[in-house]
Amino acid sequence: MKNPLIADILSLLNQHPEGITEFQIIKSLDEHIGFENIADDYQLAIFQKHFLVMNALYQLQQQLIEEERIVLDISPLKIHFITGGVQSNNQQLTETTNEKLSEYYLDWSNLKDTNKEDVEKLLENFWKLYINNDNRLDALAILELEENACSDTISLRYRELAAIHHPDKGGDTSSFIRIRQAYETLISNK
């Protein structure tokens, strides 16, 4: 099914050659076509708006590449046309298209089948991942490790620091507990 928002979004993209955000697109659609009241539940309504906009963007991206050989770059912070068009080997298209996202948003059943509880689960999982990532970065800093540290490196570094900071070795209890907590955080995420 062709998304009826494509013409409006194409017009917005034309008005913003430097690029536009998804938020700006949704805000503009709210102002121009009364896009704001599509579901009773606030979070479900936000998901539905997001889905409709992304569906239109990915449909437009496919149409432009196939019919006009123009690349529409869809990224979280900026949606814009890539100047210079498409290279003959479609290398730019491959670099700018996230196939899994495109597949998800082009499947209308993902809009139809997503209910309030599904959106709540999506948000809960997002926050868990977000918090876990923050905790992981903090733990890496405490153990003075790089982001790509493997389990063996994490364990080795923990043992080195524990040997220095363990209370039985004359170390500070709170420092040791922080080191142990960082270790547990990193090992549980592997």
Image (spheres, helix red, strand yellow):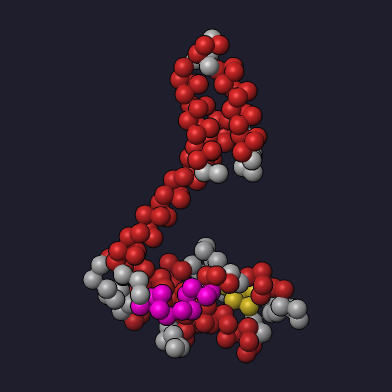
Residue 27 in view, yes or no: no
Query: Along the line of sight, which residue is nearer the eye, 167 or 92?
Result: 167
Counting every numbered tag in the picture gives 0
Q: Residue at x 27, y 73 (%)?
A: 39
Q: Relative to 122, is 183 on the left or the right?
A: right
Q: Residue at x 40, y 79 (%)?
A: 109
Please check the rendered image and state whether residue 36 is part of the magenta-colored stretch, yes or no.
no
Relative image position of residue 130 (x, y in whole percent): 45, 49
Residue 144 figure quarter? top right
Residue 68 figure quarter? bottom right
The rendered magenta stretch, by its main secondary structure, is classed as helix
Q: Residue at x 63, y 70 (%)?
A: 96
Over which residues does the magenta segment extend? 102-112
Relative image position of residue 91 (x, y in whole percent): 72, 73
Residue 159 in view, yes or no: yes
Q: Residue at x 55, y 66 (%)?
A: 75
